[in-house]
Image (spheres, rainbow, N blue to C red):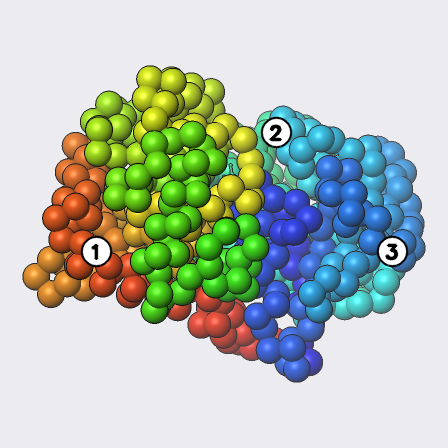
């Protein structure tokens, strides 16, 4: 039995700000339970829903020297849907109303988490063969493991994998501060280790010291070796390209199932979707105060509202997008300029634009179910889960051909009728607009072709089955 520990800063159903949480919360369930004992280690944020915090059981605690203080480290555990979760407790670090705050505080918070998490393993006596780290918040785990933990036999030989979900976030601060916080010596702050462009960089620690690097789609694994997508790490990633693989994300096919989804009023499946999708559309139109019309072309957006997601293109074209024969439904939070953009257009066209500037799991499901198309013209997209959810609900994605979007959406071919959505190549607003119009044209003028695509979109397999096997192969090659 191989023992694998996931360490991450978010995980459904406990705490989620983006797709990272979906991945960490679903992938562990899809490993072969007879061969892999996969457990997950998370911070015990005070902002985790009380219902879950109340179910956690205190296991033990210890004190750890960190950042010039002797600090409390509590260990709690909770078994949920067959997976054992450990939570690191420290209210000084994890007491905020949101998992993240400013970068300076976050660096100390996640350095603490990385060190405390590692230390906790020998306290509870569970030695993983592999620690699978996710994003910059856990970048120090392979570094610490290589450093002081080498003095302890318990830790020697543990392998590490570092998965890049988003290269843009790196955990960067000045070297002196990072040295002071982490307790790492000068040795680590050279350009072949944690130093990058004059600063200390936690993500880079993970990229340098992990035994293997993965990212969440094949295309993104290639893209990040180039200057445009590399966020300053492309040279290092080229150097490590022999230990870098892209494994596409899946989604939880139990939570995202239009046949059993408790959040949508009218269930449907790939063989019978016409009535179901129409009924869900009318229901959503009523709920959001839009004109009720089962025939109008409805475009959905569920997203963090940041430039990563291509909203500058949407901003440029919004007047054209919101034409009379379109309804636009937006659910998202993020940068004020994009929030205001959608709110403004919802006020301008109340019967056909709806801006929902908040977070709601349930509404997101109703949007995936009700819309005809889903717009995701990302500037970059490591994988993207929203388009996978859309495909699963028969809502055809309109995407830019980058990262995981390129790997998961098959563009419509009007000559042979194949495809599961629409895509455009260049980060250009007019190209995006042409593709939106092309999709709208198919919808209004060739509904038969549209419905064939809906069916094939719903029949594609984006569950974790294939990708979990790819991770198992990787684990086997390391231990
Ligand atoms: P990213 O991780 O870059 O934000 P992904 O497409 O991988 O993008 O994952 C986004 C996840 O967050 C999806 O599950 C999506 O449904 C969800 N999501 C984003 N914004 C909201 C929101 N306002 N309300 C509910 N779910 C949201
Ligand atoms: C990141 C990426 C997104 C990816 C998610 C899960 O948030 O932005 O593309 O799907 O991580 O891997």
Residue ID at (56%, 39%)? 360
Identify the element where label 3 is drawn: strand
Classify 64 as above or below 55. above
Label 2, label 3: how many angstroms apart (C-alpha)?
31 Å
Q: Residues within 10 Å of mark 1 (few under 14, many from 20)?
A: many
Q: Is residue 327 left or right of residue 105?
A: left
Image disc number at residue 450: 1
Q: Nearer the viewer, residue 257 or 479?
A: 257
Question: Residue under circle 3?
Answer: 57
In this view, the mark in front (2 or 3): 3
On-image quarter of the C terminus = bottom right
The percent position of residue 27, horizontal first and vertical second, equals 56, 63
The image quarter in which residue 321 lies: top left
On-image quarter of the N terminus = bottom right
Q: Is residue 183 left or right of residue 264?
A: right
In this view, the mark in front (3 or 1): 1
Q: Residues within 10 Å of mark 3 (few under 14, many from 20)?
A: some
The percent position of residue 372, horizontal first and vertical second, equals 31, 47
Image disc number at residue 103: 2
- The answer to the question of whether label 2 and label 3 lie on touching residues, with beta carbons closer than 8 A, is no
Image disc number at residue 334: none
């Amino acid at each position: 039995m191989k023992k694998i520990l996931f360490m991450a800063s978010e995980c459904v159903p406990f705490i989620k700000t983006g797709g990272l949480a979906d991945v960490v919360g679903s992938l562990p369930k899809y490993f072969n339970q007879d061969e892999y004992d996969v457990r997950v280690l998370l911070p015990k944020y005070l902002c985790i829903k009380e219902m879950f915090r109340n179910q956690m059981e205190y296991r033990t605690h210890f004190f750890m020297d960190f950042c010039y203080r002797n600090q409390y480290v509590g260990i709690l555990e909770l078994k949920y849907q067959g997976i054992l979760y450990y939570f690191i407790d420290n209210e000084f670090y994890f007491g905020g109303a949101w998992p993240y705050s400013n970068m300076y505080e976050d660096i100390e918070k996640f350095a603490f988490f990385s060190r405390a998490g590692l230390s906790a393993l020998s306290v509870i006596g569970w030695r993983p063969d592999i620690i699978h780290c996710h994003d910059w918040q856990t970048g120090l785990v392979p570094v610490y493991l290589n450093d002081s933990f080498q003095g302890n036999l318990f830790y020697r030989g543990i392998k590490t994998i570092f998965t890049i979900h988003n290269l843009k976030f790196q955990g960067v601060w000045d070297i002196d501060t990072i040295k002071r916080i982490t307790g790492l010596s000068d040795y680590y702050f050279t350009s072949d280790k944690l130093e990058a462009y004059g600063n200390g960089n936690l993500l880079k620690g993970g990229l340098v010291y992990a035994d293997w690097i993965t990212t969440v789609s094949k295309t993104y694994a290639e893209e990040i070796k180039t200057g445009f997508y590399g966020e300053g790490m492309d040279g290092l990633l080229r150097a490590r390209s022999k230990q870098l693989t892209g494994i596409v994300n899946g989604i939880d096919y139990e939570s995202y199932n239009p046949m059993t989804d408790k959040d949508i009023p009218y269930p449907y499946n790939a063989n019978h979707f016409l009535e179901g999708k129409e009924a869900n559309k009318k229901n959503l139109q009523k709920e959001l105060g839009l004109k009720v019309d089962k025939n109008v072309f409805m475009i959905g957006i569920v997203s963090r509202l940041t430039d990563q997601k291509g909203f500058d293109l949407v901003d440029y074209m919004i007047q054209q997008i919101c034409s009379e024969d379109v309804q636009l439904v937006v659910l998202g939070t993020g940068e004020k300029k994009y929030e205001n953009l959608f709110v403004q257009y919802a006020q301008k066209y109340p019967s056909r634009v709806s801006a929902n500037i908040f977070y709601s799991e349930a509404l997101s499901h109703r949007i995936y179910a009700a819309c005809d198309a889903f717009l995701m013209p990302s500037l970059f997209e490591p994988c993207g889960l929203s388009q996978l959810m859309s495909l699963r609900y028969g809502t055809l994605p309109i995407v830019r051909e980058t990262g995981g979007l390129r790997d998961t959406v098959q563009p419509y071919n009007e000559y042979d009728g194949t495809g599961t959505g629409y895509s455009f190549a260049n980060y250009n607003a007019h190209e995006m607009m042409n593709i939106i119009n092309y999709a709208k044209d198919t919808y209004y003028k060739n509904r038969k072709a549209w419905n064939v695509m809906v069916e094939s979109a719903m029949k594609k397999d984006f569950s974790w089955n294939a990708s979990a096997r790819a991770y198992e192969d990787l684990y086997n090659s390391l231990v």
